[in-house]
Amino acid sequence: MTKVLSLSDAIAKFVNDGDTVYAAGFTHLIPFAAGHEIIRQGKKNLTLARATPDLIYDQMVAAGCAKKVIFSYMGNPGVGSLRIVRAAIEQGKLEWEEYSHFGMITRLQAGAAGLPFLPMNQTGAISLEKANPNIKRIADPYGGKDVIVVPALNPDVAIVHVQRADANGNAHLWGIIGEQKEAAFAAKKVIVTAEEIVDESVIRSDPNRTMISEIVVSAVCHVPFACHPSYAQGYYDRDNEFYLAWDKVSESAEYTKQYLDDWVYGVKDRNEYWQKLGGDVHKRLKVPDLMSEPINYGKY
């Protein structure tokens, strides 16, 4: 028995209408392929939680998948606003909760620890406290200054993309480490998508790099190039041209619909999507090898 499923089967089995879905990954390893499969399957009334929504939640909101977003910082990184999410919030079509980055991570840490909330130091973000009644102040029981507390976040499903995983879900990831581990351990179900499915011996050869453990994983999906237009450290680069182009696409409902028709509904899976991008894009995003020094774990 293994946990390996196709991405379409994993989304069909583990993501239900009305779920809270957390697509993890900070800057890189953003699971765009899973988001596109959720769109293709027509999932509805989702609460989309993520530290930085990025373009994937703009696309999912445009496709009508979401009833609410929970986030810390919302934008097209390095470009400007997430036009679609922002417009939906301003028009009252989308519920929302905003936290600081640390507040969002603290919520996941509380969820992973099985606690109802966790405290934080006071921050300068007084306006967030006014805008979000879930951010509260309580007295320090030991006599110090008041602390901020935020409620636990336990997503119904966390989706985590990694560089490699074995068939049981033990997963290696490297590069910028975001909230992947916290999201996975806080969630009720976890879908891991991976650039490579490797033998268990590869994972065991470098145990300190195992950020996600099989004990929390529901499904493992082999999905190369799942992050585009974000990147996977060591596999392909960030497509900065796409992020710039999305700012123009998302200005227009017509252009957004055309994008979804062509690049989400119009392809059956991530492999077809990647092939459609074409050789010039593949070449532009190719990264040279830059190997870390080997580690000697000794022999036993």
Image (cartoon, rainbow, N blue to C red):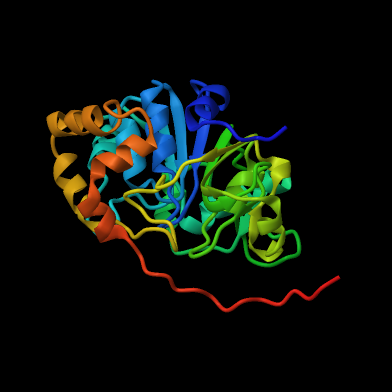
**74 and 41: which one is in front?**
41
Q: Residue at x 38, y 52 (%)?
A: 73
Q: For residue 299, which quarter of the picture? A: bottom right
In this view, 258 is above or below 290: above
User: Dividing the image into 4 quarters, which one contains the N terminus?
Assistant: top right
Q: Residue at x 32, y 61 (%)?
A: 286
**265 and 38: which one is in front?**
265
Judged left or right of residue 181, residue 82 is left
Q: Residue at x 69, y 60 (%)?
A: 140
Q: Position of residue 22 (x, y in %)?
A: 51, 40
Q: Position of residue 300 (x, y in %)?
A: 86, 70
Residue 137 in sight in this render: no
**134 and 3: which one is in front?**
3
In this view, 98 is above or below 13: below
Residue 198 in sight in this render: yes
Q: For residue 205, which quarter of the picture? A: bottom right
In this view, 169 is above or below 164: above
Q: Residue at x 49, y 32 (%)?
A: 7
